[in-house]
Image: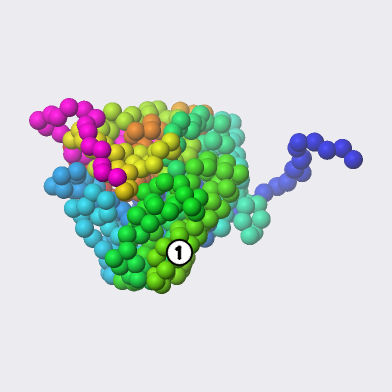
Amino acid sequence: MTTSNFVNEPACQTPVVGEVDLCVLGGSCTGVFAAVRAARLGLSVVLIEKMGCFGGVATLSLVNVWHTPLDEIFETRIFAGLSQELIDRLKKRDAVLENLESASVAWRFNSAEMQIELDQLIQEEGIQAYLHTSFVAPVVEEGTLTAILVENKSGRQAIRARAFVDATGDGDLCHRLGGETYIAERMQPSTTCAAFSGWDSLEGVDWGGLIRKHGEEFHLPQGFAWGGKVPGSDVFMLAGTRVYDDCSTAEGFTRAEIEGRRQIRAMHDLLRKYAPDNKLVLQSLPARIGIRETRHIRCLHQLRGEEVLSGQSFEDAIAYGSYRMDIHHNDKPGLTFRYLDGREVYARPGYEHVNGRWRPETEVNPTYYQIPFRSMIPRGPIDNVLVAGRCIDADTVAHGAIRVMVNMNQTGEAAGVAAALMLKQGIAAKDLDPATLRKEMQAGGSLMPE
């Protein structure tokens, strides 16, 4: 018997289960918002998600916080759109705590309620959705992406579309199309969150200090632990793990999931030992580790850190943010924060902050930054694909600011609107008029500050 490094798959005919205007790969809020905005502009849309619910990090990974829609000095609203619409829907269920004048947490929400709300939103818009469905391969005919192959409980299937949005987070579609990709030299680590009941039993206990003091005993890397209550409950969401594996590979992703869960148990055991009167009960773990960064897609423009920190204006700006640049270091504990007013803070739990400046003081400072549409248009080889979410083209410093969910949500909305305009005008993304794109986004509820 001979062996080789390859297995030949027999040729087969794959049934087409959908023929639509737009196919969105990835059902995070970014992907959902792309699908919704396109559907509201009259496109037929298919939305593909490999997990069992929509919402991505906000639901699957239990990260139940979104950042402020105000600028850095909390005076001007800089975005609205579907992020605000979803929050308003959750408020009707008492599923949101709000503090817009917070640089860290503007909205804390119930992730389970968000799952159901996203289901309803998709159904209301007539979007054809597939959960538990994995993207397998692109189908390119005469230089044009015409379909994708997927796998699910019904077997292998094909979905034809005129345009596609890659909202997979890892740029899986663009990567398998042969587009240029890159991994940051200092890729930010991932975090596994967890939900605990009985957290009030730690009242008066410096639980963060205990983790810092005794973490080495439990093989815990030095990190930055934080968290908060789920609105209307006694459940506490803890985010305190640090996982350094590359989640863009099958092997790395597997190691990361297992290591993240190990660290959660280690923290629990540590608190059992050094705060023995606690009544903590581990209630739930995420369906997927919270990933900050993996693969980026090379696009027409790489957003650079200096452009973000200087508040650079772009004629094709489609997203606005004020979340401070933060880098979760992979070579030392703690975080570095940079602010638009020039301040820099190195924050290491248990130590005094190291305050400095990344630039000298100036009389006038920007209060928000912008993301250009060009950073969502892959360089090639296919021109009917857009990228949305954390895999857009951004360097390490820029990514440290723009990666948060409320910013990425806006890239999803831009992708959905752009796809509708592309198809209606019969043009490629690179040929879209930025003013027309911005006007259409604004008409749909987005704010487009000057």
Looking at the image, which residue is at 33% across and 70% down? 200
Q: Is residue 42 magenta?
A: no
Is residue 374 shown in magenta? yes
Q: Residue at x 53, y 55 (%)?
A: 262
Query: Quadrant of the rendered structure where residue 342 is?
Result: top left
Q: Position of residue 290 (x, y in %)?
A: 45, 51
Which element is circle 1 on?
A: helix
x, y percent for residue 4:
80, 36
Packing grade of label 1 (10 A; few <14, some 14-19, many >=20) is few
**Horizontal side of residue 335 vs 152, given as left or right:** left
Looking at the image, what colour scheme do you see? rainbow
- Above or below, 25 against 145 in this view is below
* Residue at x 61%, y 56% (from the top left corner): 152
Would you place residue 58 above or below residue 302 in this image? below
Query: What type is the residue that disc 1 sits on?
Result: Lys
Residue 353 at x, y = what percent?
Answer: 26, 42
Where is residue 113? Give x, y as percent. 38, 66
Residue underneath mark 1: 273
Q: Nearer the viewer, residue 366 or 325?
A: 325
Look at the image and tell me in which quarter the C terminus lies: top left
Visible residue check, residue 384: no
In magenta, the rendered stretch is 351-376
Depth check: give the residue in front, 208 or 77. 208
